[in-house]
Amino acid sequence: MKIFTTKKETENYFANKGQKITGFVATMGALHQGHISLIKQAQQSTDEVTCSIFVNPTQFTDPKDLEKYPRPIAADIAMLEQAGCDVLFNPPVNEMYDDNEKWHLNLGDLEHLLEGKFRPGHYQGVTQVVYKLFNIVKPDFAFFGQKDYQQVLVVNKMIELLNMPVKLVMCPIERENDGLAMSSRNIHLTPFDRENALILSKALNWAKNNFDSNNIPAIQQQAQQMISSQPGVELEYLEIADGQTLHTATSETKNIVALVAARVGKTRLIDNMLFDW
Ligand code: PAF
C-alpha cells in the first residue's frame, strides 16, 4: 500500500491515473469491520481504492470529543494492508487547513435537523473536509456507510451543489452479532454500556417490525419510550423520517428511515434502519 501524507504527492499520484476507475473511502481512523466492508465494496466496483485517515477538527462540536477520539494508526495501517487497500492518505492537520479558513455551504434543513440540532456546525465541518479530500484524491466513486445516514444525504447535497464529478455509493451498516452497529466509538463503552447500547438496534427493529403508516407518531413514541426506560441510556432523538428530507414521516411517505442518537454512559452513539426501501 502506498502511504501519502502530503497533498502534493497525493495530487501528483492521481494526476496520472489514466483510465483507472478509482474508489475512495474517507475515514477518521480507528478502523473496524464497518470500514473494511466499505473498502471491500469499493474493490468490487473500481480498479484502485484509496482510504483517507484524518481526524477532522472542524467537524467536532466538543473539543473533549476531538481530544479523546481514538488514533490507533499502526493498527489501522495493518488492517488496510490486510484488506488490500491500494493507497492511504494520512495527512497532518496543517496539511489540510490554513489558519482562519472560512467555509459555508447552504445545506438547507439537512444541516439543522436531528444530528444538526445536537452538533451545530458538524455538517459544515464534514463538507469542508470531504470537499478537500475529493479534490485531492479525485475519485470516481466514494463509498460512505449508511450508519451516518444524514452525512450521506449532506455529502450528496454538496456534490450536487458544487457539481462535483464523483458518485456517492451508500453501503449497508455492519453490525455485531447481537445487533450493535459497528462504530469507532464502541471501544469507549464499558461492559455495562455495551449491554445497554443494544436497546438502540432493538428499538429500531421493533419500530420496523411494528410499522404501520397510519400510526407513525404512536410507533415513534413507543420506540422512544423503550430507549428512555433503559438504565444508563439518555435518548437524544428517535425519529421516523422521510429518507430524502429527514422531515417527520407521514402516512404518504414512501422511503422511510428511523434514526436514533443516544448517550450510552459517556459515549454518544447513532444508528438507523431503512423501512420499505
Ligand atoms: O464519517 C466519517 O468518519 C467522517 O465524517 C468523514 C466522512 C471521514 C469526514 O471527516
Image: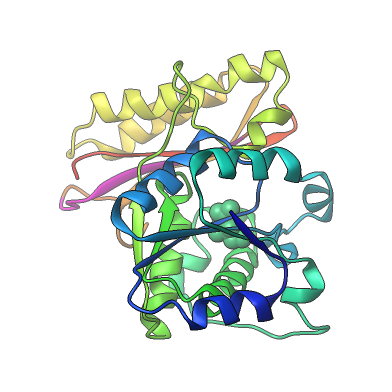
Looking at the rendering, the quadrant in which ligand 1 lies is bottom right
Please tell me whether residue 255 is drawn above or below residue 207 in the rendered image.
below
Q: Residue at x 68, y 59 (%)?
A: 54
Q: Quadrant of the C terminus?
A: top left
Rendering quarter of residue 104: bottom right
Q: Residue at x 81, y 74 (%)?
A: 94
Please tell me whether residue 36 is drawn above or below residue 203 in the rendered image.
below
Q: Residue at x 72, y 27 (%)?
A: 265
- Where in the figure is residue 211, as x and y percent of width and height? 23, 31
Front residue (pair 78, 93): 78
Count all numbered tags in the image, as a single digit.
0
- Where in the figure is residue 88, as x and y percent of width and height? 61, 58
Front residue (pair 45, 190): 45
Report whether 107 appears left or right of 244. right
Rendering quarter of residue 51: bottom right
Q: Assign the magenta stretch its main secondary structure.
A: strand
Front residue (pair 47, 99): 47
Report whether 115 appears left or right of 69. left
Please tell me whether residue 228 is drawn above or below residue 158 in the rendered image.
above
Please tell me whether residue 70 is drawn above or below residue 100 in the rendered image.
above
Question: Magenta stretch?
Answer: 252-262
Q: Residue at x 56, y 76 (%)?
A: 13
- Where in the figure is residue 196, as x and y percent of width and height? 60, 18
